[in-house]
């Protein structure tokens, strides 16, 4: 029925139970969620919900915040919904319910179910680009996409349908405006493709929801008098995707979008990730989601998704899992253009994680989980301050000491995206295919539900991960609880960053086959079977591809899933030290409630100390650096860098000189110490 | 045989004889040409020709200037060739001949006729992107394209074939590497499309040259032992054009080009002018040239050219005829994004003029001549200082007083392009179709040659323009000298900037029909028939489309083909004065050997004085301004501008508010004083 390699469990079937991530989630739930709500409710003095109230009151002429504020509050609702779905919280539920009522009341003012407070309050004559309206500015599809997500997630969390009904009404409205319908005058509808992507995946989710819950359509019709038309939702997304780059009136818009909005050519011919990185990653997420739902012998959507992913992973992915190198227009740079003072917006990292999740669902390859984990750990988690109330928007890999987290921002887009990805992180931990259970992420958690057995029957099953020591210790313990004895495969991810990794089943060691980044443990399982995992977690130096001139002669420090950095406060010799060939030492530290730090010696015999990157800027202002100079062979590359930069205005190349690319095929980073046998697993 | 609406005369059939442009050309020939040669010969101390000498001597490891220096000196050769073709100059001819010998000798060192001194001297293993070579940096197709132009123009000027033989060899080499050939292993050749366009039009010209002179191929083969294959040249250009956006290994390059190099999608689906403005305009020139030579019922090249042209003219053309608003990457901005401190490189204006010339050849519409004339007058001519030895690269429409012409530049690309367009400006003055003679540009000049009569016979004919008073006075006198009495149409361009225009034939006034910007004078002509032209040349205020927020509440001053500006030295009240509704006065001035200036009153009753923009910065440093504040209705738009700018980081739209677009259809600028009946002619 669809191109799914690995099914995700339902959100409520998984719970983060212990360890590093459960702790993060607890803080987010107890502190950050309330902080974000309070700041939005006081935003621009009036508060974000004032927009809906003004629509209800029919008072035009003013609007709180930029046009995409409707979307932002809906993203917050989605994030909170996911959190309370597994840790119910009555106060938060009441809050969301009240928001839903206001949004619904505002929508009821419009006979077509159109909801975009900015347009209604400021330029009511300019819906959908009409009368000089700007699709790229007014964010209509984006806002409705966020509402759709909010409606679905809140329904899944609580069973309440009010907000979902708003989403359906609004999406129906988009279908009426845009969906090609040969039987309707004006075919093929209005040539609108989302200027800011997001709605693509959201509307596909809506389509899937009604397919998965066949009775829901009838309920919605009875309760809210709206007509649910899942096939039209699918066609809407397909229309959006197929018309990228060629929709008829795209160049009549005041602001043509082009590469900025991934609207420069047909999606099936796009070969490089370009433009605004958040829009891009959300577009590719929707593309992959559409590809999964599209039955075609030669699935051009998924082929494009793979091509774009590979281009991103091989040429444009910062070592932190961040994307979007360029401040100007928040966009991707050229290939291998990975400056250390890059933009790397939190939102882009979250969007990349969503994309990685969809790619994993389509292809079941552990490499997508490597990127998801890296982005969440080293590009998204750094967003939040230790106290849970301040936020990074940009996540550069070097700082002159002026960078600090914001308490709030004129465009507070990152806290909502942060809540969204954190709220659903648990959805990626486990996966299922026929006769197979995946453990994708090593995180203290519990799954309770069913799986499809080899013979197609449903088997009740619980899986738990207990005593997971990551990211500080390379240990984990998976306990299986099948309802009855059953043969199936447990696929345990072997992360790209792990060194030697042993997997014992009930204390038996075996040489499990490795496939697409997973150890495949095939046997007859019974209740309380234990899989004991032990990974080597060495501190390693990593170097970047020779084409990355910004990192020529430099290395970054990693341990397990964590990227490390040097902060000024720990390093009297400065943050741009010159490393020698000496060993790196891992030390326990009492900082931040207990973490591991990396220590070592500089080339001159001094000391340096590195902290996990996600924790930087929690002890006052100061310089920070990720890519550190490494003695040996670096000087030559530094020269080349300068030469290349000399003519940068004319689109500099990689400069001259012959470059040895042996061993770099298909990879952007690799371990620096080549005399050590460790090689990140690729199979 | 080809899609030509209006044929251009051969270069040597026309001569600038008198008036404004003859004076400019004289200065360029006597002063600027020698200045440019001297500076190139001393460039980086060693001089530009050292590269060829080092190749001859087999001394690698060093190169003078960036990789595109081969191209630049060839552009100079082309420009000089055009100049000496009509005003022969033995010293210059000797110089070029010597250059040709050195280039030829360098090329002879390579068995394949490959010639790119940077690659040969610095990275010989990296031809054509091989072994990590960078097509975008090494400029191989660009340099060979420039050599091709030089060879053709020098041959046409002098009949000498040595440099042409180098071009043929080099192009043959490109064909061997790239041209698709189903019979050859590795089909379809190497997937290279020019990263910096130019070669497209150059190679089309080579194809046309051998078609026009059938005996030349044999001569080349005999004298130089090279095989001339015109059909392959056509196929090479077609390959380049058809593979834009989709060539196989485009995304494996270290520097993918995308919009920057107009390689973001198939050319037939491109709908907006984007990327590096010089590359873009040269690409579109080649596209149009290819379209002209392509026999197809539904000519997709020309359709794309028209679509791109309209997009450029309606949304991205500065009032000076400059293109390429953005300093960063020297590229086009978004639609209607026309800041006054824009980049507007001289090279881009010259390239736009070339494109306009090709569009005119394909469609015969006077509107292309309007843009050609505007760009040359107000974006290219300003490049050169009054003394002929200093050069603007950027041509912004506002200056804080720090901008000055350069004596020379690290990337001296503009002086060669300047010489190229100035050297061939005369080619655009006249045009021919069956039974019709065009006077496209009102410039003191003489054509001597033939035309095709109505019955297809050749008629000998001379046409001269004498007593042309432009740009200062709206008078011109066209005298025809047909060898014998003959009926044909004389098409006289009615410029978009002209006010009332009368055309008397032998003192008889008539209401000549206007078609595509031309008065069509149909009659039986005989020797010494005189066409007397008189145009109203009012000083006018021009306003920009409401979407151009940079010019909201402002007007620019124009008179005839000239754009005017306020310089600090003439304006004690400053250059950003507030104009009132009072009249503009045209005054003669003795400055610069006699020009017309515009004077008027500010809203507060003070005086201001405006100078032709091309002359600014010839009297020392100082502030300059083109777009001046205009009392009346401006304030509202200023507010909108600020609002839009507020969220610029997120791709600002046009802001809110309802905008009246009546009367703006298909135009970017219009006369400000709406109570005056003058409307620029569109028919």
Image: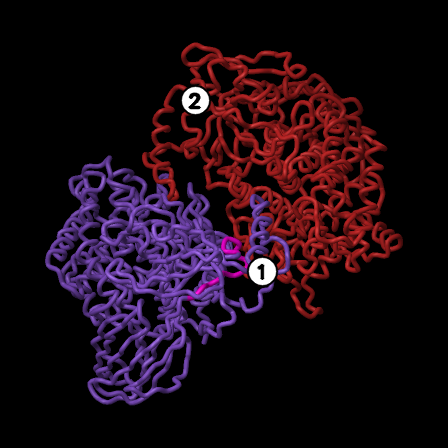
Chain colours: A purple, B red
Quadrant showing the N terminus of chain A: bottom left
Q: Secondary structure at mark 2?
A: strand
Quadrant showing the C terminus of chain A: bottom left
Residue depicted at 33% across the width and 72% down the height: A474
> Callout 2: 10 Å neighbours few (<14), some, many (20+)?
many
Question: In which image quadrant can residue B569 be found?
Answer: top right
Magenta stretch encompasses residue B300: no
Residue B521 picture location, percent across and down: 67, 28
Residue depicted at 44% across the width and 14% down the height: B602
- Magenta-highlighted residues: A540-552
> Could one spot residue A236 in this view of the protein?
no
> Callout 1: 10 Å neighbours few (<14), some, many (20+)?
some
Foreground pick, A32 / A167? A32
Q: Is residue A598 left or right of residue B9?
A: left
Residue sitting farthest toward the front: A605
Q: Earlier in the sequence, mark 1 or mark 2?
A: 1
Chain for disc number 2: B
Q: Are marks 1 and 2 on the same chain?
A: yes
What residue would you read off at disc 2? Answer: B629
What number is the disc on residue A93? none
Q: Is residue A433 left or right of residue A150?
A: right
> Could one spot residue A413 in this view of the protein?
yes
Residue at mark 1 to residue at mark 2: CA–CA distance: 49 Å
What residue would you read off at disc 1? Answer: B247
Q: Is residue A446 left or right of residue B370?
A: left
Residue A158 picture location, percent across and down: 15, 63
């Amino acid at each position: 029925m669809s191109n799914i390699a690995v099914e995700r469990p339902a959100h409520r079937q998984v719970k983060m139970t212990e360890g590093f991530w459960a702790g993060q989630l607890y803080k987010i739930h107890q502190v950050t969620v309330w902080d974000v709500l309070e700041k939005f409710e006081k935003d621009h003095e009036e508060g974000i919900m004032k927009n809906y109230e003004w629509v209800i009151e029919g008072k035009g002429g003013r609007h709180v915040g930029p046009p995409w504020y409707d979307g932002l509050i809906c993203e917050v609702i989605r994030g909170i919904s996911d959190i309370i779905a597994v840790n119910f919280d009555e106060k938060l539920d009441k809050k969301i319910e009240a928001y839903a009522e206001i949004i619904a009341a505002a929508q009821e003012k419009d006979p077509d179910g159109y909801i975009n407070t900015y347009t209604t309050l400021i330029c009511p004559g300019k819906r959908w680009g009409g009368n000089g309206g700007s699709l790229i500015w007014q964010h209509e599809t984006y806002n409705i996409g966020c509402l759709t997500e909010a409606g679905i997630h809140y329904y899944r969390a609580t069973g309440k349908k009010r907000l979902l009904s708003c989403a359906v009404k609004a999406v129906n409205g988009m279908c009426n405006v845009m969906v090609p319908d040969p039987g309707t005058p004006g075919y093929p509808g209005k040539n609108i493709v989302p200027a800011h992507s997001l709605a693509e995946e959201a509307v596909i989710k809506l389509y899937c929801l009604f397919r998965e819950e066949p009775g829901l359509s009838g309920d919605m019709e009875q309760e809210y008098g709206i007509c649910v038309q899942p096939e039209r939702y699918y066609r809407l997304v397909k229309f959006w995707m197929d018309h990228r780059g060629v929709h008829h009136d795209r160049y009549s818009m005041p602001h043509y979008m082009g590469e900025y909005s991934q609207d420069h050519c047909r999606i099936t011919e796009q070969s490089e990730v370009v433009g605004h990185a958040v829009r891009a990653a959300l577009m590719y997420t929707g593309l992959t989601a559409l590809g999964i739902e599209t039955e075609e012998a030669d699935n051009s959507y998924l082929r494009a998704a793979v091509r774009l992913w590979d281009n991103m992973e091989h040429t444009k992915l910062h070592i932190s899992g961040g994307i979007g190198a360029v401040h100007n227009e928040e966009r991707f740079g050229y290939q291998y253009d990975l400056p250390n003072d890059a933009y790397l917006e939190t939102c882009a990292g979250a969007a990349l994680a969503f994309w990685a999740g969809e790619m994993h669902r389509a292809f079941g390859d552990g490499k997508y989980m490597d990127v998801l984990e890296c982005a969440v750990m080293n590009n998204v988690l750094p967003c939040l301050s230790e106290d849970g109330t301040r936020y990074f928007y940009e996540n550069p890999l070097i700082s002159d000491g002026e960078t600090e987290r914001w308490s709030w921002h004129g465009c507070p887009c990152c806290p909502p995206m942060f809540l969204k990805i954190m709220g659903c992180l648990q959805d990626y931990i486990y996966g299922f295919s026929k006769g197979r259970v995946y453990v994708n992420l090593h995180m203290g958690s519990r799954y309770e539900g069913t799986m499809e057995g080899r013979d197609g029957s449903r088997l009740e099953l619980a899986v738990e991960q207990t005593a997971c020591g990551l990211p500080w210790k390379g240990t984990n313990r998976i306990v299986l609880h099948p309802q009855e004895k059953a043969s199936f495969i447990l696929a345990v991810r072997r992360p790209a960053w792990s060194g030697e990794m042993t997997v014992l089943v009930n204390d038996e060691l075996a040489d499990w086959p490795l496939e697409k980044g997973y150890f495949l443990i095939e046997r007859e399982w019974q209740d309380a079977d234990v899989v004991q995992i032990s990974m080597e977690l060495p501190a390693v130096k990593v170097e970047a591809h020779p084409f990355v001139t910004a990192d020529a002669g430099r290395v970054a420090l990693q341990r397990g899933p964590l990227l490390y950095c040097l902060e000024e406060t720990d390093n009297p010799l400065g943050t741009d030290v010159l490393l020698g060939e000496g060993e790196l030492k891992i030390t326990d530290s009492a900082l931040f409630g207990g973490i591991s730090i990396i220590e070592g010696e500089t080339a001159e015999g001094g000391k340096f100390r590195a902290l996990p990157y996600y924790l930087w800027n929690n002890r006052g202002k100061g310089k920070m650096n990720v890519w550190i100079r490494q003695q040996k062979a670096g000087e030559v590359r530094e020269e080349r860098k300068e030469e290349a930069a000399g003519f940068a205005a004319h689109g500099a190349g990689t400069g001259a000189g012959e470059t040895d690319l042996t061993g770099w095929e298909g990879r952007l980073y690799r371990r620096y110490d080549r005399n050590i046998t460790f090689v990140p697993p690729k199979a």
